[in-house]
Image (cartoon, grey):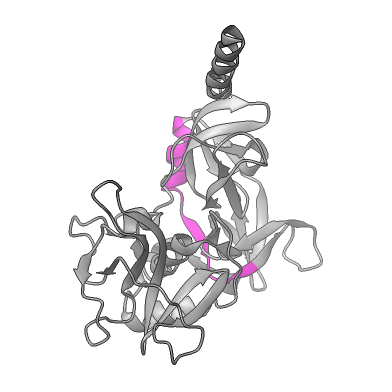
Amino acid sequence: MKRTILLLAALVLSVPAAFAQKYDGPEWAVVNSSSCFLRLKPDYESGNETQCLMGTVLRVKGAERYWRQVDAPDYKDVWTTELNVAFMDEAGKDAWIAAPKYVCCVEYTRIYAEPSTVAARIGDFTLTDLVRKGTETRRGWVQVFLPSGREGWVRAYEVMDFDEWVRTREATRENLIATACRFLGTPYMWGGASVKHFDCSGFTQFVYRQCGIVLPRNAREQIYTGEEVPYDFDQMQPGDLLFYGTPATAKKKMVVAHVAMYYGDKKIIHSSQVVRISSLTPDGEDFYDREPLAVRRILGHVDTGEGIRSVAVRPWYF
């Protein structure tokens, strides 16, 4: 019996090693679909940790069947499928980063094989996806190239020059709340970090990035950024982040389980089942009856060494 238990334990311990097979393919890849899921293990039933948008550079580390183990800007040792990415060597990766790009500036559209909405569809194209700029234009359409090099066409009003997009970001309280409200009703999904679905910290990160600020990916990291402010309706400002979870005790560390954005008027906007506005007082609609662990102010603390950077300094994709 003891021997059987030891053998089973050895098999269990050997499973992770089976995933880390030797990999001698291209070291780099760029996300080639509108978004890709990054999972804990090379299995569709494995937990989704986050998503990366089209144009994001990944370092490839391992392979298991059609899965690839990668490091992403916010996560290490996660897995995605090979058809979601375009593989590159070092020179190809550097050329992709240096190439002039368009960024998708509408919430959802398509990339077409020809400059026509009746042409074959290459794939969907969502807010903040990146493609390489082409040189041709045709009657309101612009030529683009996917990371794989495949040619496509999108309507000119659906994209911006990426450098111009970076220059025109304005991180104000008003812009943060207006941006957050654009996504009301978007469904919650664990690991969601694209316009199609959000988890709580994916939502706050995405909203801030639209306004030119790159936050860490998870609530347990975001809580250590910026400046702590009191949980006081007279002192909190729209855009402040409120964190919820289990306080630390003498025996256990603090557990950060949720993050929301202060909306103003004693309300929060957050991704909880769906993106919604909840009251912080019992007499308001959709009362969120939880005491926050902390409130953090992000604005005024960008590029100051406090874990918050502007998209001009760190575009997140690279």
Q: Residue shown at 67%/55% (left/top)?
A: 152
Quadrant position of the N terminus in the picture: top right
Quick check: 166 above or below 314? below
Where is residue 168 drawn, in percent x and y?
A: 37, 73
Q: In this view, does 59 lie to the left or right of 197?
A: left
Q: Is residue 300 left or right of residue 263?
A: left
Where is residue 311 drawn, in percent x and y?
A: 34, 60
Q: In which quarter of the image is residue 82?
A: top right
For the record, the magenta segment spans 90-108
Q: In this view, does 236 lie to the left or right of 18?
A: left
Where is residue 316 drawn, in percent x and y?
A: 40, 53
Where is residue 314 drawn, in percent x and y?
A: 33, 53
Quick check: 235 above or below 80? below
Q: Which residue lies furthest to the front in this view?
A: 1
Q: Which of 105 and 45 lies nearest the eye of the viewer?
A: 45
Quick check: 235 above or below 67? below
Q: Which of 120 and 49 lies nearest the eye of the viewer?
A: 49
Q: Residue furthest bottom?
A: 283
Q: Can residue 164 be seen in this view?
A: no
Q: Please tell me whether residue 143 belongs to the stretch shown in magenta.
A: no
Q: Residue shown at 27%/85% (left/top)?
A: 233
Q: Quadrant of residue 104?
A: bottom right
Q: Please tell me whether residue 104 belongs to the stretch shown in magenta.
A: yes
